[in-house]
């Protein structure tokens, strides 16, 4: 596989970040004091990487959806006002659809669109606007169709047969077959989303809409200076509870030390992905730690076209060689939990399988020897240098490299900047690459279908390892079409066990999504999700 060199922007950001650390002074770096607050009533967030385009239906990565979600809304949303400790899976709530009806056969979904809602450009929200957006993501024969939007959201609209505007505030979606997770999937983001955009803006800007984002959300786009900041301002005409802050600024600071220094200097109010070694010191200085149980899995996909990782016992051996406890405890200082299930705890159908994922070097070596690989083999692992949910990808990959060396598997690590890596990852692995790392997950067990279905193999879907298992496909289809939630849950559990037994993936850790906030920030909630609601945030300076 050819490595793509990091972008020049990435190098520039590193230099600027290091300069920021130096200029903020020895006192700040030592954690001895906090600087004066300089953000006013604008909430400034230091994020871990540059964001993707501000087109919510096209953008990839949680970093981007955390920003886009403040400007855009789906028909069905999740209630993120409830902390993880009170709700392992956030309950669904009305979004731009104030209610919906589902037919007994599970084929017809009728959405009743909110009245008296306007997009940021003044365009009224109505059923025609919703249909326009759905056809952009789904209808290849429609003039508004976007291949990029469809590519990111095809797994949501896969079973749609027709879309109809019934009246000005009613849209009916008819499915080819029941889809038990349809409503939950409408609320999801991170690899595209179904958020509704202004049809006026879409017609005006076309594929350049990402530079001119227009939604209905509580915040409106002000400006973007790439590599430096994205500025949003409060929407004074928002239909729901209005934000208490005047605006939000998202500042990409890929260097964790620069994020910490910016927090201590008072130039940001919250940092994402703090360096695990810094968390205890920051808390002792009076900063707040907020974390939860998001549907996050830091995992490896195995390449089924690779000489070695196409062998089930090799995949099982690699899973047994990983020291998940050690990574969580020693490298990441308790900011994550070891992953003992192929999906995260906050996804439905969770199955814990310590027999497959607890470290057992003797069994790992026996498995390799049973297929004639007692002397090990050479392989390549690809990952990023930073990015959405990636935590510390390079260091974590090196930890895995050491783990696998214990059973004779010699790993070559290839890394790229996050946005570049997303493109390479989505195309699928080259034959000489054994493993590709990603951070992903959903509050829906349907994520397993997205990651492993034979129908969604790369480059036509996120199954980047080309995994194909008819028994798995059959089990997931039964879960998808089940009208009884309990029956669907049973089939998802069956599917999780199939993936585990076959070693199709290697779940490594589940992130707690830690954020560190200044002492005066109030109202921020870490729900069981990878994004957040900022309408309740207050700055009590």
Image (cartoon, rainbow, N blue to C red):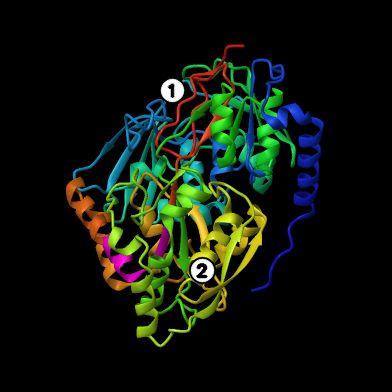
x%, y% of residue 90?
Answer: 35, 34
Q: Quadrant of residue 212?
A: top right
At x 78% / y 29%, what residue is drawn?
25
Judging by the rendered image, the residue that carries numbered circle 2 is 435
Q: Quadrant of residue 423?
A: bottom right
x%, y% of residue 442?
Answer: 40, 47
Front residue of 248/199: it is 248
Front residue of 403/43: it is 403
Residue 421, label in figure: none
Dot in front, 1 or 2: 2
At x 42% / y 35%, what residue is drawn?
292
Left or right of 126 on screen, residue 380: right
Front residue of 344/191: it is 344
In the displayed orientation, state which residue is furthest to the top.
541
Left or right of 367 on screen, residue 104: left
- For the record, the magenta segment spans 495-507
Does residue 440 show up?
no
Q: In which quarter of the image is residue 48?
A: top right
x%, y% of residue 293?
Answer: 40, 39
Q: Is residue 133 magenta?
A: no
- Quadrant where the N terminus sits is bottom right
Q: What element carries label 2?
A: strand
Judging by the rendered image, the residue that carries numbered circle 1 is 115
Instruction: Decide which of tag 1 and tag 2 comes sooner along the chain.
Output: 1
Does residue 370 show up?
yes
Count of residue discs: 2
């Amino acid at each position: 596989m050819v490595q793509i060199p990091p972008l020049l922007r990435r190098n520039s950001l590193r230099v600027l970040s290091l300069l920021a650390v130096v200029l903020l002074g020895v006192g700040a770096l030592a954690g001895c004091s906090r600087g004066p607050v300089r953000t006013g009533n604008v909430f400034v967030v230091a994020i871990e990487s540059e964001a993707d385009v501000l087109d919510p239906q096209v953008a990839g990565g949680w970093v981007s959806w955390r920003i886009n979600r403040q400007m855009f809304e789906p028909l069905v949303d999740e209630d993120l006002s409830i902390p993880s400790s009170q709700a392992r899976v956030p309950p669904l709530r009305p979004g731009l659809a104030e209610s919906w009806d589902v037919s007994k056969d599970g084929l017809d979904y009728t959405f009743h669109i909110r009245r008296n809602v306007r997009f940021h450009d003044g365009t009224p929200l109505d059923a025609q606007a919703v249909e326009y957006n759905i056809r952009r993501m789904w209808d290849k024969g429609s003039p508004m169709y976007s291949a990029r939007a469809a590519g990111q959201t095809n797994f949501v609209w896969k079973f749609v047969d027709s879309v109809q505007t019934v009246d000005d505030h009613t849209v009916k979606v008819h499915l080819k077959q029941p889809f038990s997770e349809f409503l939950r999937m409408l609320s999801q983001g991170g690899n595209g989303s179904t958020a509704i955009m202004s049809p006026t803006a879409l017609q005006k800007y076309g594929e350049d809409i990402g530079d001119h984002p227009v939604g209905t959300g509580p915040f409106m786009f002000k400006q973007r200076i790439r590599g430096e900041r994205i500025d949003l301002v409060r929407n004074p005409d928002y239909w729901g509870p209005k934000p208490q802050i005047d605006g939000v600024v998202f500042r990409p600071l890929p260097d964790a030390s620069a994020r910490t220094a910016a927090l201590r200097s008072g130039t940001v109010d919250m940092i994402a992905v703090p360096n695990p070694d810094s968390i205890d010191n920051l808390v002792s200085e009076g900063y707040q730690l907020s974390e939860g149980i998001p549907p996050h899995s830091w995992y490896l996909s195995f390449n089924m076209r690779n000489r070695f990782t196409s062998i089930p016992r090799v995949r099982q051996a690699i899973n047994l060689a990983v020291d998940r406890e050690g990574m969580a405890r020693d490298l990441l200082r308790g900011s994550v939990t070891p992953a003992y299930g192929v999906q995260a705890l906050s996804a439905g159908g969770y199955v814990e399988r310590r027999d497959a994922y607890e470290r057992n070097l003797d069994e790992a070596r026996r498995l390799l020897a049973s297929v004639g690989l007692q002397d090990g083999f050479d392989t390549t692992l690809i990952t990023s240098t930073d990015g959405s949910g990636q935590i510390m990808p390079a260091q974590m990959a090196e930890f895995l490299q050491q783990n696998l060396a214990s059973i004779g598997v010699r790993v070559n690590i290839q890394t790229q900047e996050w946005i570049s890596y997303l493109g390479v990852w989505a195309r699928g692995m080259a034959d000489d690459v054994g493993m590709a790392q990603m951070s992903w997950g959903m509050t829906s067990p349907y994520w397993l279908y997205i990651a492993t279905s034979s129908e969604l193999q790369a480059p036509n879907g996120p199954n980047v390892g080309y995994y194909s298992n008819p028994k798995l496909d059959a089990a997931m289809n039964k879960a998808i079409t089940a009208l009884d939630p309990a029956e669907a849950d049973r089939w998802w559990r069956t599917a999780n066990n199939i993936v585990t037994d076959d070693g199709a993936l290697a779940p490594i850790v589940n992130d707690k999504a830690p954020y560190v906030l200044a002492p005066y920030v109030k109202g921020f909630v870490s729900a069981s999700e990878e994004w957040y609601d900022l309408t309740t945030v207050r700055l009590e300076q």
